[in-house]
Image (tube, rainbow, N blue to C red):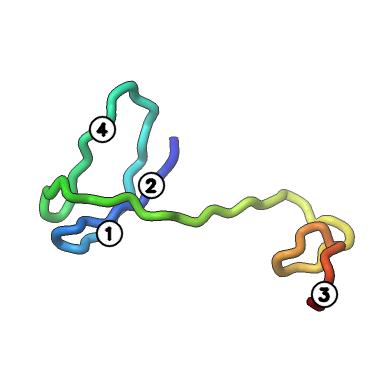
Amino acid sequence: MPIYSYVCKDCGHKFDLLVGIISEKPKFKCEKCSSKNIERLFGSFNVGSSGNKTGFSGGSCPTGTCPTSF
């Protein structure tokens, strides 16, 4: 189940919700002021691996073959 971040447009409170798969649209509300005027935020994600790859140069070049100058 994904975890989504929300912000209340009324009080500014930011919070996370664990969202399951359901057939109808859930009616979430702010956990601080109970307002239903909330907005889902864009979040980041991370993809990792369990081992260190040969030739890995670090940074944003996971294959180790990316150019070092532009």
Q: CA distance from mark 4 to mark 2?
A: 13 Å
Q: Is residue 29 left or right of residue 67?
A: left
CB contact under 8 Å: marks 4 and 2: no
Q: Residue at the front extreme?
A: 70
Could you say where residue 62 lies in the image, as x and y percent from the top left? Answer: 76, 59
Q: Nearer the viewer, residue 65 or 46?
A: 65
Kind of element beneath mark 3? loop
| Image point (14%, 59%), residue name | 10
Q: State the CA–CA distance, disc 3 to disc 1.
A: 38 Å
Mark 4 vs mark 1, CA separation in Å: 18 Å
Where is mark 2, residue-wise?
A: 4
**Which badge, 3 or 2, comes first in the chain's sequence?**
2
Residue identifier under label 1: 14
Q: CA distance from mark 3 to mark 2?
A: 35 Å
* In the rendered image, the vertical position of residue 8 relative to residue 4, given as above or below: below
Tell me where residue 68 sits by quadrant. Answer: bottom right
Give the residue number, with chain letter if any, for mark 4.
26
Callout 1: SS:
strand
Amino acid type of the residue tagged 2 in the rendering: Tyr
Tell me which amino acid carries mark 3: Thr
- Check residue 68 in the rendering and tell me which mark sits there, or answer none: 3
CA distance separating discs 3 and 4: 47 Å
How many numbered marks, from 0 up? 4
**Labels 3 and 1 touching (C-beta < 8 A):** no
Q: Quadrant of residue 24?
A: top left
- How many neighbours does mark 1 have within 10 angstroms: few (below 14), some (14-19), or many (20 or more)? some
Q: Around disc 2, counting alpha carbons within 10 Å, would you say few (fewer than 14), some (14 to 19), or many (20 or more)?
A: some
Of mark 2 and mark 1, the one earlier in the sequence is 2
Badge 4 or badge 2: first in the primary sequence: 2
- Label 3 or label 1, whichever comes before in sequence order: 1
Q: Secondary structure at mark 2?
A: strand
Type of amino acid at the residue the image marks with label 4: Pro
